[in-house]
Image: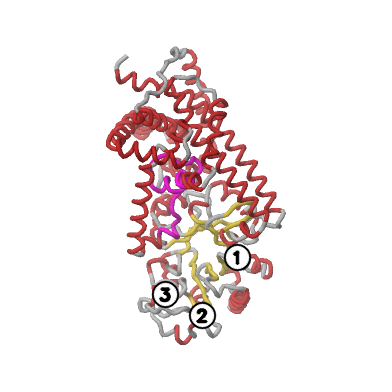
């Protein structure tokens, strides 16, 4: 056996053990989260709530049920962390030594180590791995938050303000430095029984001395794995799909073959996803022992696998993929629709294509073909309702005064890129017979008086079917839906837990990360519609245009409408790829 083969042997031999461990622990974590979810819902139901969301967050700290939910959530997080992170460190040590893997034995050794993290410093480590690591895109993160990112409504504010961009960049550099210095903190706690502070000190010392080698070793490790994975994907997926497009098969045969190989690719990607983190953790553990000046337990290779066993796995794989291919081919147009049914709603009037929250902006939304226009209303000092998003007019009109401190006459003297500030009545007239106006009750004057006055104005214009009243305050939306059932309502939320689909409204408008396929399906089962806000990037827009949501609120409405046209010309392969990416993200 060559030196290179000796280095790779532990990783190759580890694959069956990793797969066994991952499948078992994913099942355990799934059951655990399900049970915790049931307990949380029972506590919520005892307060006559169906969900707790960003508009009702104070409930968590002002009631015993909310505090109990927070306590259970903390216990659940610690348990999840122990299984998803700490146990992988224990597993990686066993894999490096060549021990046969017994998952229950690994968990038995790993779970007690979580006690070291039940302190402020330990919780800081958990929160870093849970929230910061995914944003930085480095190191190991919790599987349930690996796709976490900064919500669009926050990132857009940062990107639009130079000082915020600078501060955010500096903050990320600080977080990156802290993360690099503490790369071995989990290993020191789990493998050597150190406290979090002691482990942090050891990690900083090891990284200060070995950071160049660490960088070199990681680059080489990622390159080797990358070459292997790319080779497998090219041979088993890319080349077959390319041949399918070149060879003159009939449309029916091409569809069947496409479904077969794409299904194989999806299963392969899921398999790679299960193996990737434990393999990386093995490398980290190997380096930890090396930098300490110690050697892990010597590697003892097993006997070679029985070829008959490998052949049986291949047959099972082909049969499973074949069965899935038959089922998906029969329902292809339903599972992978050619057309997008998502409606486009221009944000703040007409999005970025016209002065925001103006009558001209609303007219622009109809001109480009949008289904709806979203506006923000606030009450003036003398009781009128005008369109404005921020707490004052500084950003849009250069006047640092609040709407509630100004009269309508004073506000009408302002100019937004040459356009006057619009009133609610003017917005309604600009909408009549052209589309749907989503009216957000905004700011400190968003109260029941605003709700009553807005409903009255909408009715006076006879536009009940052309308006939807939306807002971030659930109590206010619940009031409108209960008091005026003839008026359509929508609740805006960027975070929610519980039976969100049962909230008392007609539309649920969700921030991008919250709008998963499962959540969308549950909302539709309750007879409600789903909106996503505010999706501006081309990639994000395409993702949601291929989903089952009902409407997309965006500043880039023209871009979204152009994407809808592009989607109509997709091949079967592109249709499958788009839909699967939407489901797996």
Q: In the image, is residue 97 above or below residue 546?
A: above
Residue 506, percent from left and from top: 61, 61
C-alpha gap between disc 3 and disc 1: 25 Å
Say whether residue 267 is visible.
no
Cβ–Cβ under 8 Å for marks 3 and 1:
no
Q: Which residue is mark 1?
A: 489
Q: Which residue is mark 2?
A: 404
Q: Earlier in the sequence, mark 1 or mark 2?
A: 2
**Disc 3 residue crowd, few under 14, some 14–19, many 20+, Cα 10 Å:** some
**Disc 2 residue crowd, few under 14, some 14–19, many 20+, Cα 10 Å:** many
Residue 486, percent from left and from top: 66, 68
**Disc 1 residue crowd, few under 14, some 14–19, many 20+, Cα 10 Å:** many
Q: Which residue is mark 3?
A: 360
Is 131 in the magenta? yes
Towards the viewer: 548 or 554: 554
| Count of number-bearing discs | 3
Towards the viewer: 449 or 323: 449
Q: In the image, is residue 394 above or below residue 436?
A: below
Residue 88, percent from left and from top: 48, 32
Q: In the image, is residue 501 above or below residue 366?
A: above
Cβ–Cβ under 8 Å for marks 1 and 2:
no
Label 2 residue SS: helix
C-alpha gap between disc 1 and disc 2: 24 Å
Q: Earlier in the sequence, mark 3 or mark 2?
A: 3
Q: Earlier in the sequence, mark 3 or mark 1?
A: 3
- State the extent of the magenta-drawn residues as a range: 126-155
Say whether residue 490 is visible.
yes
Is 136 in the magenta? yes
Horizontal side of residue 524 vs 152, given as left or right: right
Label 1 residue SS: strand
Label 3 residue SS: helix
């Amino acid at each position: 056996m060559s030196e290179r083969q000796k280095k790779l042997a532990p990783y190759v031999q580890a694959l069956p053990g990793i797969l066994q461990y991952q499948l078992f622990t994913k099942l355990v974590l799934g059951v655990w989260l399900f049970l915790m979810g049931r307990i949380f819902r029972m506590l919520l139901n005892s307060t006559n709530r169906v969900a707790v969301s960003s508009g009702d967050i104070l409930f968590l700290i002002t009631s015993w049920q909310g505090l109990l939910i927070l306590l259970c959530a903390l216990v659940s997080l610690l348990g999840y962390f122990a299984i998803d992170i700490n146990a992988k460190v224990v597993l990686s040590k066993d894999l490096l030594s060549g021990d046969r893997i017994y998952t229950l034995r690994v968990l038995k050794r790993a779970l007690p180590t979580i006690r070291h993290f039940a302190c402020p410093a330990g919780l800081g480590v958990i929160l870093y791995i849970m929230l910061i690591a995914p944003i930085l895109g480095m190191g190991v993160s919790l599987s349930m938050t690996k796709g976490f990112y900064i919500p669009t409504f926050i990132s857009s504010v940062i990107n639009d303000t130079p000082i915020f961009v600078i501060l955010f960049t500096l903050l990320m550099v600080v977080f990156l430095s802290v993360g690099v210095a503490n790369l071995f903190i989990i290993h020191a706690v789990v493998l050597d029984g150190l406290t979090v502070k002691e482990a942090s000190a050891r990690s900083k010392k090891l990284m200060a001395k070995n950071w160049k080698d660490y960088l070199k070793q990681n680059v080489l490790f990622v390159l080797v794995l990358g070459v292997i994975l790319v080779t497998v994907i090219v041979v088993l997926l890319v080349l077959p799909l390319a041949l399918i497009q070149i060879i003159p098969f009939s449309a029916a045969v091409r569809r069947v073959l496409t479904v077969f190989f794409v299904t194989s690719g999806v299963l392969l990607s899921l398999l790679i996803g299960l193996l990737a983190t434990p393999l990386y953790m093995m490398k980290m553990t190997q380096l930890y022992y090396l930098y300490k000046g110690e050697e892990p337990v010597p590697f003892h290779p097993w006997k070679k696998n029985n070829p008959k066993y490998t052949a049986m796995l291949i047959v099972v794989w082909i049969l499973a993929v074949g069965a899935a291919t038959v089922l998906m081919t029969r329902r292809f147009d339903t599972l992978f629709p050619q057309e997008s049914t998502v409606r486009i709603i221009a944000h703040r009037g007409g999005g970025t294509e016209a002065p925001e929250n103006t009558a001209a902006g609303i007219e622009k939304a109809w001109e480009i073909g949008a289904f709806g226009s979203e506006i923000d209303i606030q009450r003036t000092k003398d009781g009128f309702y005008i369109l404005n998003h921020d707490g004052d007019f500084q950003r849009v009109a250069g006047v640092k005064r609040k709407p509630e401190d100004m009269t309508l006459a004073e506000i009408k003297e302002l100019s937004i890129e040459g356009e006057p500030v619009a009133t609610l009545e003017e917005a309604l007239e600009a909408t009549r017979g052209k589309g749907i106006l989503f009216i957000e009750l905004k700011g400190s004057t968003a109260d029941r008086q605003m709700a009553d006055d807005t409903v009255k104005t909408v009715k006076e214009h006879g536009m009940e079917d052309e308006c939807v009243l939306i807002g971030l305050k659930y109590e206010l939306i619940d009031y409108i839906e209960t008091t005026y059932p003839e008026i359509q309502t929508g609740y805006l939320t960027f975070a929610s837990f519980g039976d969100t689909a049962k909230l008392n409204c007609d539309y649920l408008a969700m921030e991008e990360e919250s709008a998963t396929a499962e959540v969308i399906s549950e909302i539709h089962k309750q007879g409600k519609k789903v909106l996503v806000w505010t999706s501006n990037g081309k990639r994000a827009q395409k993702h949601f245009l291929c989903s089952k949501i009902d409407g997309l609120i965006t500043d880039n409405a023209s871009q979204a409408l152009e994407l809808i046209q592009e989607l109509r010309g997709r091949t079967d392969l592109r249709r499958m790829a788009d839909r699967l990416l939407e489901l797996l993200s």
